[in-house]
Structure formats: structure tokens, C-alpha cells
Image (cartoon, rainbow, N blue to C red):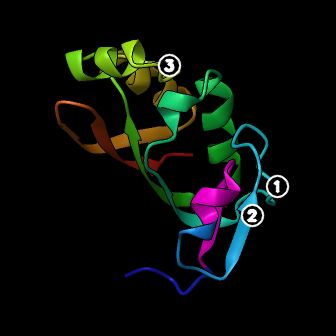
Amino acid sequence: VLPTMPRVLFDASYEMLRRSPGTMKIVGRAEGLPFRAQSFFLISMIGVTEYIDQTEMLLKEISRVSQPDAWLLLTSAPRTMANLVRRVLGARLFLRSDAEMASLLAVANFKMVGRRRTFMQSQWLLHKTN
């Protein structure tokens, strides 16, 4: 099962961190993570990629801070009617197809183990392949 490791909460929004349980909370930008290389065995990024224009840079950073045999759980927002409505309502979203995300994840050395899709998002379970 999972090794015992500290739980780190990281977000660009102090307000989001304030509402989340946990002791180690860090505010910052995901494109420049303030962690040493190979720091994490498990990374969860829910509701992040659709707000990041530089997804390739983000995934390179995630790969850098991931241990060699790490797991990544993330969501992405494909171009669906629900997400297009979110855009019309004012959300600044960077929508990517599943094929585009799969390509970016492969470049960052993550192999897809599983994927599910809802009307708003794709949910990815990935394993790092060095």
C-alpha cells in the first residue's frame, strides 16, 4: 500500500487552502513547484489543468517532483458542451482533448492506467515510467 508521507496541500489560492483540512499548506504557482526532485509518491491534481495555459510546463514540473515509480491522479477538461457553457459564463478555461492530454502526459513520462469521462471532465490514473 502507500508509504507513510506527509500530506502537502498546494494551491494558487489561499482561500482554497484555508477551506481544506491539512497541516502543510503552500500557496504558489503549479508551473514552478517549490519542492525537491523526486519528493512525492502520489500526486492528486483535481480541477487544475483546465486553469493552466502551460500544461506541458506543469506536467514537466509534476514529473520532476514525482518519484520514479510515482502515481498521478488528475482531471482535465475536454471540449464538451458543459465546459463551453462555463467559458460563455466567464470562466477562463484551457480545454484540451483527451488525445492532446494523453500526448502531453506521455512526454512527461506518465503512462495511463485508467481513464473515465464525465460530461465535464476526464479523470486520469497514471503511473510514472522512467
SS assignment at label 2: strand
Residue 2 position within the rendered picture, expressed as x and y whole percent measured from the top left: 43, 80
Going by the numbered disc 3, the residue's amino acid type is Phe
* Residue bearing mark 1: 34
* Residue bearing mark 2: 26
Give me the residue at 67% from left, 51% from top.
13
Going by the numbered disc 2, the residue's amino acid type is Ile
Check the image and report above or below for 63 versus 69: above
Report how far apart the C-alphas of labels 3 and 1 lie in the structure.
Answer: 24 Å
The quarter holding residue 67 reads: bottom right
Q: Judge whether residue 53 can be spotted in this image.
A: yes
Give me the residue at 28% from left, 35% from top.
122
Residue 40 position within the rendered picture, expressed as x and y whole percent measured from the top left: 62, 65
Is the residue under label 1 in contact with that under label 2 (CB below 8 Å)? yes
Residue 79 position within the rendered picture, expressed as x and y whole percent measured from the top left: 31, 15
Check the image and report above or below for 20 versus 15: below
Q: Which residues are magenta?
A: 7-17
**Magenta region includes residue 65:** no
Q: Judge whether residue 67 can be spotted in this image.
A: no
Please state if 129 lies on the left or on the right of 76 as rendered. right
Please state if 5 lies on the left or on the right of 14 as rendered. left
* Residue bearing mark 3: 94
Report how far apart the C-alphas of labels 2 and 1 lie in the structure.
Answer: 9 Å
